[in-house]
């Protein structure tokens, strides 16, 4: 088979300019010499010691302010017997267990309950209705729902007179959307790092322990699968994490979001189209290029991370090497390995760097083997007129600088025993062509 029309994904010009083309989307990115050594963040200003209550009341996602947001669908707790997911927790039971992670409906959904009900005649399952009715029947639960509904109306710009004109029955009927939500938030317990009393350092994904991050991932996967099961009209569930305001976070508290959609979205459609042309495209055009250009950062039995190319922002790509494309069908070992690599990259990146974590996976309606992979994008630059005019994006850090920023820090973190001990780094990685395990024989 010839190479007619083939475009090299990474080209280095004689002056050192790096030109990248994403093999799946066609996005073109240039990195100009001399810009890659700039600091990723500005020094933190106005550092102050934490005040009493800051660790539990700093924002609405904190444990001390649970009454200000909709009731969680479930919580992940640590017990003497191991980790458990608890559902249907009533207000009187909030402090019976410590919620290390909570699954909370988003107060302002991207695609709300009315969207699905109006466009598709979507109706909540009997299990959802039972949870809703149980919460409404509880006096404290009823008052909690009314309080949140009033707060939502205030935030929506309604006047006191308008709010007074809305009856409690109408508000309670509207609160069904909290239980039938197709836009959920996975909220971590900590707002600040433990023992950060003098610095007020925010607790990011890399601040979690290896075990905690694995539970964070498992709980998110559990919610992902549940959204598909609960909403038959959901063709794709977008999973993402916005960390810090430059990356789109409205609240500086660690959380992921899941949004059910009735379409795949442009990025997913590009990947599906690429797979239809070549079922082994991720090995041949993505991983193989990363191997050839020495961009591999870390690897273990079931996952691999490399500096991405053809992205608008400096990016690390983390791929599952499992032949199972759906995260919820993977083995505990495969998920643990994926979590360990993602956690290590977050830890090496640092909580001070704004970033987006974007998940890609095979949804139930896909007939091509779209591997589970996560792009971690450093939001350290702002798109401007040049990009908008030319659709050529200026990425300030080339893939080799991304690798070289992370690998030394990963070695330090391994010595400090903060990341999983079985992760191989840089030249230790056995990464080779076709190591993702995807080939034309896997079409189902």
Image (spheres, rainbow, N blue to C red):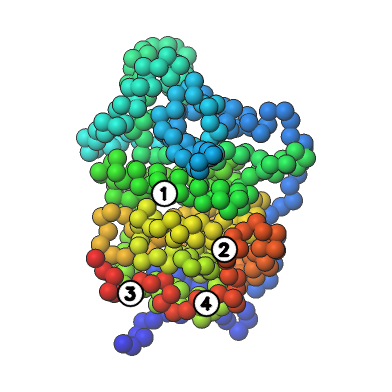
Q: CA distance from mark 3 to mark 4?
A: 19 Å
Q: Which residue is mark 2?
A: 314
Look at discs 1 and 2 and give the one toward the viewer: 1
The residue lying at 72 percent from left, 28 percent from top is 52
**CB of mark 1 within 8 Å of CB of mark 4?**
no
Residue 430, numbered label: 4
Residue 53 placement (x, y as % from top left) = 68, 28
Q: Which residue is mark 3?
A: 439
Q: Quadrant of residue 372?
A: bottom left
The residue lying at 59 percent from left, 27 percent from top is 64
Asked which secondary structure carries label 3, the reply is loop
Q: Residues within 10 Å of mark 2 (few under 14, many from 20)?
A: many
Q: Please say if 301 is above or below 338.
A: below
**In the foreground, 191 or 118:** 191
Residue 306, numbered label: none
**Quick check: 132 left or right of 376?**
left
Q: Is residue 433 visible?
A: yes
């Amino acid at each position: 088979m010839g190479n007619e029309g083939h475009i090299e994904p990474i080209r280095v010009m004689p002056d050192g300019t790096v030109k990248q083309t994403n093999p799946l989307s066609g996005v073109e990115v240039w990195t100009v010499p001399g810009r890659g050594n700039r600091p990723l963040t500005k020094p933190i200003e106005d550092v102050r010691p934490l005040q009493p209550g800051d660790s539990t009341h700093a924002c609405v996602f904190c444990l001390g302010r649970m009454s200000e947001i909709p009731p969680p669908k479930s919580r992940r707790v640590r017990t003497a017997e191991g980790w458990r997911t608890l559902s249907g927790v009533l207000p009187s039971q909030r402090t019976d267990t410590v919620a290390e992670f909570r699954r909370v409906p988003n107060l302002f959904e991207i695609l709300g309950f009315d969207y699905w009900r109006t466009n598709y005649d979507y109706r909540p399952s009997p299990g959802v209705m039972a949870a809703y009715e149980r919460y409404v029947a509880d006096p404290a639960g009823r008052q909690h729902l009314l309080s949140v509904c009033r707060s939502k109306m205030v935030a929506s710009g309604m006047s006191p007179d308008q709010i007074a004109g809305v009856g409690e029955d109408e508000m309670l009927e509207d609160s069904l959307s909290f239980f039938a939500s197709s836009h959920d938030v996975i909220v971590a317990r900590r707002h600040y790092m433990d023992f950060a009393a003098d610095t007020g350092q925010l607790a990011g994904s890399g601040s979690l322990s290896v075990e905690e991050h694995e539970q964070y991932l498992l709980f998110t996967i559990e919610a992902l699968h549940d959204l598909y099961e609960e909403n038959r009209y959901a063709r794709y569930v977008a999973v993402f994490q916005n960390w810090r305001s430059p990356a789109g976070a409205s609240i500086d508290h660690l959380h992921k979001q899941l949004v059910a959609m009735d379409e795949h979205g442009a990025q997913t459609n590009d990947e599906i189209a690429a797979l239809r042309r070549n079922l082994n495209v991720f090995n041949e055009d993505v991983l193989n290029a990363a191997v050839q250009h020495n961009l591999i950062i870390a690897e273990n039995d079931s996952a691999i991370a490399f500096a991405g190319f053809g992205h608008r922002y400096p990016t690390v790509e983390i791929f599952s090497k499992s032949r199972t494309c759906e995260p919820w069908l993977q083995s505990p070992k495969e998920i643990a390995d994926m979590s360990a690599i993602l956690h290590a990259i977050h830890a090496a990146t640092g909580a001070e760097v704004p970033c987006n974590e974007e998940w890609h996976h095979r949804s139930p309606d896909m007939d091509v083997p779209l591997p589970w992979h996560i792009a971690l994008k450093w939001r350290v630059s702002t798109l401007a007129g040049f990009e908008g005019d030319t659709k050529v994006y200026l990425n300030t850090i080339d893939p080799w600088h991304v690798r070289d920023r992370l690998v030394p820090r990963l070695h330090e973190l391994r010595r400090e025993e903060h990341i999983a001990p079985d992760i191989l780094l840089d030249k230790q990685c056995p990464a080779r062509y076709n190591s993702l395990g995807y080939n034309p024989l896997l079409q189902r």
